[in-house]
Image (spheres, rainbow, N blue to C red):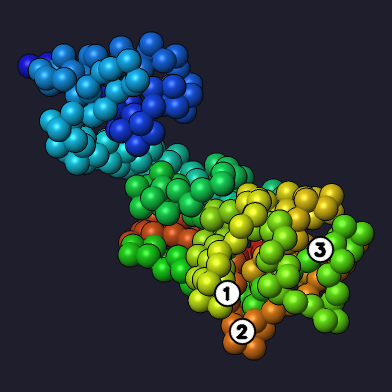
Amino acid sequence: MMTPEIREIQTFLLLAETGSFSATAKILNISQPAVSLQIAKMEQSVGFPLLHRNPDGAAITAQGKALIPLMEEIRNAHSNLLGRAAYWQRFQSKQVKIWIDGSINAYRIRNRCDLDEPSLTKSEWDYLGSTSDWIEALQNYEVDLVIAGSFLKSDTLHGIDQTILQEEPGITIAWNPECFSLEKDSFDLPEALALSVILPSPSLCLGFRKFLDSWCDSTYQAGLKNFIECKSELDALNACKFGLGVIVFPGDAEKRMGLSQAGLTFSKGFIAPLPKAYAQQIHYRSTEKNPKIIAAMHSLARVFEHSK
């Protein structure tokens, strides 16, 4: 029996998730025949069919389903191996890998670091996408520090600690008065939520969507119907200015995003019951011992204080 390659295992697991050769090919940025070839090689390696092929498509065999948990362990172990290797390479070169979310404060921190903290000049920076994969990336040593927001401390996870940069109360709702007839003095939250709603993506505020869904379900027995998820506060601000929807963001979005300066009207809610609902934080591994990473975390906190 031949040993399957990690690329073939990854392709098969993705195919099992998507249920589609074309969708798998699109995600991997390869051709559909290339996906079929990798699955065929995988089947040759294990010695039995992994898929039932028919004119309407393909379905995973019972034997293929039984292998999925084992393949997931291999994929995760391979990812951990690469993450640890990259971590030690950074350790030897005294580099720190930092990811930041799409908040305006995070952009300010990044821009001021070159001026205020020369000790961070060797750091490797990147911006989060629209997912919350940074949690797994921290756990797997793929990244060292992550600046990201959370709501109601929902990101308290095993093995990850936080340094709080800023805490803010409640939520903020904002709209373009030229596009929506909402009244600030007699604001009605259900009326706003019935419109197209602009929300932060999970990478921008972990746990906020869960809070809104739970609150809408318990209060109105209905969830959000029309919404746009934005991976940056600037994208959300522009979408609201163009009348694409009503912003519903955590904390004091007026202070962070300059809503009134952009010509938007805003209202705040849940101030008293949720005094420290939203937090911007630096996330790091609880077991981190690398002095360069610890020093970088303190440097980022100092830069944030200077950027206020």
Q: What residue sits right under mark 2 in the picture?
A: 275
Apparent side of residue 199 relative to residue 77 in the rendered image (left or right): right
Q: What x and y, as percent, mark residue 46?
A: 12, 21
Q: Image quadrant of residue 105?
A: bottom right
Proximity of marks 2 and 1: CB atoms separated by less than 8 Å? no
Specify the label residue 25 is tagged with.
Answer: none
Quick one: 196 or 162, which is closer to the camera? Answer: 196
> What is the three-letter code of the residue carrying label 3?
Trp
Kindly state the secondary structure of the residue where label 3 is placed.
strand
Left or right placement of residue 72 versus residue 45 in this view: right
The C terminus, quarter of image: bottom right
Q: Residues within 10 Å of mark 2 (few under 14, many from 20)?
A: some
> Rounded to the nearest whole Å, what is the CA distance between mark 2 and mark 1?
23 Å
First in sequence: mark 2 or mark 1?
1
Q: CA distance from mark 2 to mark 3?
A: 23 Å
At which x and y percent is residue 158?
Answer: 33, 65
Task: Give above or below for 192 relative to 63.
Answer: below
